[in-house]
Amino acid sequence: MAAPGAGRTALVFGGSGQIGRPLLARLADAGWRVLAVSRQSQDARGGVRWLRGELAGCRNLPADVDAVLSCGPLDAFAAWFARGDVACARVVAFGSTSLEVKQASADAAERDVARRLREAEAQLFAAAAPRGIGASVLRPTLVYGAGRDATLTRIALLAQRLRGFALPDDATGLRQPVHVDDLADAAMACLDAPDAHAKAYALPGGETLAYREMVRRVLATLPRRPRLVVLPSALFRALLAPARLAGIAAGFNDAALARMREDLVFDAAPARRDFGYAPRPFAPDAAMFTPPA
């Protein structure tokens, strides 16, 4: 029996990223002819042909493919796709639940992120519809699993360096961390799901848990098991300013602190209904927070 993707060609942007790598492997294993675009030279890996370039100027792209997938910044991809440089029948692009989470943030930069995501989705769907292209956007929640994310891996590295990690006692907002492999599986399933055309889907993880419990499980996987220290919220806020000055909490703004108290919960039912999305519960191990060499 032929592989599900036998004879079909996929063009992938962001293939060297944390979601892109497992997605490339799945496409190749399924028999797709895979063309992946990267700004840097990449080592050849089974079933993948790498093209050197970027969205703003890759001159050796094919004229047409069966599917285009994007695992990188959605706004840049949507602008490229709208130009119509490559003909295709199917598009699956990753966005982010930040579109909803950050749209009313107290931080102007975060509101701008939400705006750009929202406009990029609209641009993508508007460009796909008149060309008869089935486009889908996948919005992950809190991504982990490849040691390359900016949240849980950063927490793990900081906890190992300091031999502990502090949280305020009101860090009880709910989270749904999602593994990169589950996102790659979702993209593969979505490719051949006609009910997913012209739709955007939240892709939460398979378990909903409090922020503090999520961090506790991360620390429990690490060597020497760094201690989780829970501080009164007023004391935590007082210590945050010197921590920022020392570089320990660089980039951790007041909006991020406020979100620790918020429930960021999304419904997986539409993705489950339309393409069988079935993410795993949050049961991490240390390798998931180890940056690649």
Image (cartoon, rainbow, N blue to C red):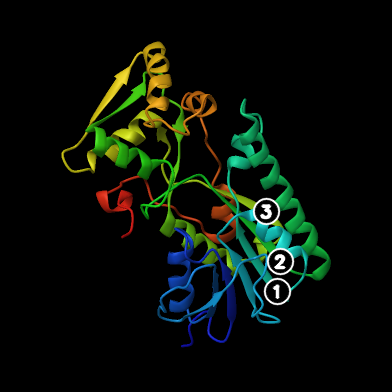
Horizontal side of 52 relative to 86 (left or right) equals: left
Residue 273 position by quadrant: bottom right
> Circles 3 and 1: CB distance less than 8 Å?
no
Where does the C terminus fall, quadrant-wise?
A: bottom left
> Which percent across, then down, holds residue 8?
59, 82
In terms of sequence position, does the residue under pointer 2 or pointer 3 come before the other?
A: 3
How packed mark 1 is, by other alpha carbons closer than 10 Å (few <14, some 14-19, many 20 or more), is some
Q: Amino acid at mark 2?
A: Gly
Label 2: state its secondary structure.
strand
Label 3: state its secondary structure.
helix
Residue depicted at 47% across the width and 60% down the height: 17
- In this figure, which residue is indicated by the disc labeled 2? 134
Structural distance between the alpha carbons of marks 2 and 3: 18 Å
Horizontal side of 101 relative to 88 (left or right) equals: left
- In this figure, which residue is indicated by the disc labeled 3? 75
Residue depicted at 45% across the width and 40% down the height: 176
Q: Is residue 19 above or below residue 47?
A: above
Query: Exactly how many numbered labels are in the figure?
Result: 3
Horizontal side of 278 relative to 88 (left or right) equals: left
Q: Residue furthest front?
A: 245
- In this figure, which residue is indicated by the disc labeled 1? 89
> Which percent across, then down, holds residue 75?
67, 53
Q: Amino acid at mark 1?
A: Ala
In terms of sequence position, does the residue under pointer 3 or pointer 1 come before the other?
A: 3
In terms of sequence position, does the residue under pointer 1 or pointer 2 come before the other?
A: 1
Residue 243 position by quadrant: top left
Q: Residue furthest right?
A: 130
